[in-house]
Image (cartoon, rainbow, N blue to C red):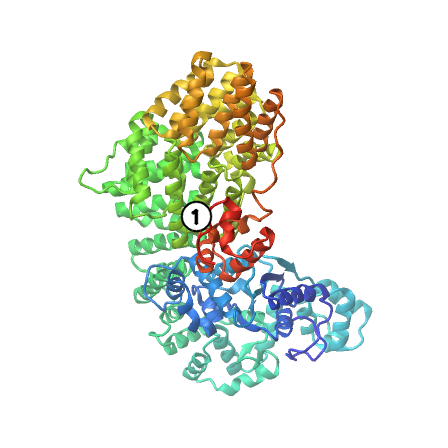
Amino acid sequence: MAAYIPGRFDTSDSAPLLGRRQECLAIDRLVETVAEGLSGALVLVGEAGIGKTRLLEYAADAAAELQIARVAGVESETQLGFAALHRLLLPFLDRVDRLPAPQRDALGSAFGLVAGPPADRFLVGLATLTLLADVAGVRPLMCLVDDAQWLDRESLEVLAFTGRRLHADGVGLLLTVRDEPAGTLALGGLPTFHVAGLAETDALRLLTSVAGRLGPQVVERIITETRGNPLAMVELSGEQLAGGSLLPGPLPVGRRMEEHFLRQVRAMPAETQSLLLVASVAPPDDPAVLWRATALLGLSPEAADIAVSEGILSLQSGLAFRHPLIRSAVYTGARAADRRRVHEALAAVIDPGRDPDRRAWHLASATVGINEDVAAELERASERARSRGGYSAQGAFLLRAAELTPDPEHRAGRLFASAGAHLVAGDPLIARSLLERAVPGLNAPETRAGAEQLRAAIEMFFARVTAVPSILLEAAATIDPLDERTIRGMLFQALEAAMIARRYTIGTTLVEVARTALKVPLDPSARATIPDLLLDAFATRIAVGYLPAVPLMRAAITALRTDSDLVEAGMPLAVLGWMAMADLWDDEGLRAVIERLDTFDRDQGALHALRFTLLDLAGVELLAGRFGDAEAHHAEATEIATAVGMAADKMIYQVELLAWQGRKAETRAAADIVMGGWAEQRGSASTINHVLLALTVLELSLGRYHEALACALRVYDDDEPGTGSLILANLVEAGVRAGDRAAASAALARLSERAWASGTSWALGMLARSRALMADDDHAEALYAESVEHLGRTTVATELARTHLLHGEWLRRRGRRSDARDRLRIAHDLFATMGATAFAERARTELLATGERARKRTEQTDHRLTPQETQVAGLAAGGATNAEIATRLFITASTVEYHLNKVFRKLDITSRRQLARTLHGEPASGNT
């Protein structure tokens, strides 16, 4: 409760606030924004008793003309996955049938309403967002969430996701949370207001309102020691404040306030204390359970009267504690035997058909020692939680089941399963601790192998990829017997990790991992999965060589394009897929596979994988010279990283785009971060190669050939699949221009071997250009023409433009100024249109040397659209409906409409028919 003037237990909604001007202004702005049809979120953070709940009441008053949905976290429900979300959305579940099928199924699975696979929490988040936006379509909606630190983890993460995606939906989200990591970390990225204690003037007004005039020493001590906490000040009796009795020492602030409330409760009759104990753990949304349990315990309903009159309980919305601290004080302050008795009564009166999980939890809380029957009931509850996607609840149920399990091996198995659930839920520290407890009791080879895979997954979660290969290699070698599928699965995980860590790998080497994988070939009678194909292809590429790996990589790429058994498990498929296709210079396959994965990841709600797929999709658009589309994909990847609570590291992942745009300072700043320790801390030598490739391109665009050569040689020496091939043509150019023909010749030899083996137009175009750079005058021109012909058949517009530039430079240096102008003019126009400013400047300088001044182009490529506006406009121009765009971009249809309206205004158009022509000069098509 915040400080207000009426009596101590007055809960009137109209009670005026003391102070809190800035807090109220922030809430008013949020309510006004929502009333206007836009959206917003705000988190009020502060210690217990600071006034957050009272500010929530102020928000309810301010939003009186809007729809209001409310929920409060309850400490006893933190283990019940999606319980709080269900309570919040319960009034709107009649509208669930209006959701798109994947969202409807995910929400139904999360709430146990339909049978199906475990709900992906981010798909549940999108369903929540869509449902709230649909409700707000009738009248704007304010969602008020109190004590978010006590929401179950799944509900909290879904609400955080929803809050980050709100934009133009007429939905407001206002949460209060204690200043504790449990709540504030999950809500990171949402606008936050830290609620502090009352200012001295307001604190004095509050003290005077409840106790009259006070001595200055008493006032100073109360305000200083309570730090202006309104609840702490109000709870001091008038007699104490007036100096009639000694002030309690220490004064009740934070945890000590619970002791203060507990003293009040213990002054009440024993029957009232027992009733309060039942109320502290009874489900808040089912008062019938409370009264059945009290009746079973022989408690009279009238026992609540004194608690109400003393302000411990409130009748404002059923029978509830006036402040959450009182609930906590009652439960923690009770004797263990009394708590067990209450849990036993609640388990007895809860309908096992309607709420079996809550019943199981109460049974467990009522049990001392070991009890396999209760443990088995908890394990069944954990399966139900898993089927709903409630992995945090699954982990909690299994942990308690393990504690009650008499058989040691069975107990270890439940601990192991709990560890896995906690990792999926995002609790790696708990997962690691439980795994260490489980391992000594795990005897079955398959389970021990699974434990090592889980250990490796925990390391990956902490971005400690370097130790993962050795963990898995040792497990595969020492755990016997294991079936071939299990071993190959472990080796695939090991190879994935080693390909990222490369020279940072600890306890083994990348080559050793690859050789070990080749010693475990797939049974010829077994069907090869995508991981099987990728494992064989990359193990061969690393341990044997490029040429034998080419057909294997082609088979893997074909599977990624066509197989129906796509599964995102472990490292996103886009990561290794990009490596394979870049290694073969397969631009057609690259676009097809990445666009397929983009659709698949969106349909599955696999946001972690989608983030990396979007980064690769940005790379595809970059190669095609569509820098605006690349920026839009990077922006969405950053938004998704924020939505799922990951570090965005935006500059690092955009470094290649920054280099092509000629943004020198930003490219080098990103490189400095990676080279300055970022990559080594994460064990990602692969990231260094990507940054060095970007720097090579930047230095070439600036004509700094020696610097480009130094960067390119490092990538050449490491020869990572993907970057190891893409660097070759760059190294030839840098070597020729820097006067190091030995380096250029070595790169050309490797490029020749690989390009002929690949046979793609992209590869052959790069080879012809590189040969032209090394050729004498009699052969160079034909090779440049050959390069243009090959690259003209690809989507790689950036490299086609570079060939025109190099050809034009070669012609000018041979005095053929007129012919040079044609090539350089094409190159300049292509680069300028793309936004490749440094390459465009290089072409402009060459044109000036021929006596021609480059024409200035009118800025028309981005139309000043934001990245998300660019995405929405592009999809709309392609014929997608608002609902389809919303589903694809994880936003709502109303947000799509909002962006389209802005696009139309910026482009000065009035319908979708004009979008394609305006954006890309294409014929209009699609819906209007």
Few, some or many residues within 10 Å of mark 1 (<14, 14–19, 20+):
many
* x, y percent for residue 286: 45, 77
Compared across the picture, whether 552 is left or right of 179 comes to left
Name the kind of residue labelled 1 in the image.
Answer: Leu
Q: Is residue 141 above or below residue 588?
A: below
User: In terms of depth relative to the viewer, which is nearer, 584 or 79?
Assistant: 584
Q: Quadrant of residue 495?
A: top left
* x, y percent for residue 650: 55, 42
Q: Residue at x 52, y 87 (%)?
A: 302
Q: Is residue 466 above or below residue 69?
A: above
Q: Disc 1 on helix, strand or loop?
A: helix
User: In terms of depth relative to the viewer, which is nearer, 198 or 121?
Assistant: 121
Question: How many labels were placed on the picture?
Answer: 1
Compared across the picture, whether 204 is left or right of 765 comes to right
Compared across the picture, whether 405 is left or right of 245 comes to left
Q: Is residue 645 visible?
A: no
Q: Residue at x 75, y 76 (%)?
A: 209
* x, y percent for residue 626: 50, 40
Residue on which the image places disc 1: 610
- Residue reaching furthest front? 818
Q: Quadrant of residue 254?
A: bottom right
Q: Quadrant of residue 147?
A: bottom right
* x, y percent for residue 355: 37, 72
Q: Quadrant of the N terminus?
A: bottom right
Q: Is residue 796 visible?
A: yes
User: In terms of depth relative to the viewer, which is nearer, 417 or 189?
Assistant: 189
Q: Is residue 303 above or below residue 917?
A: below
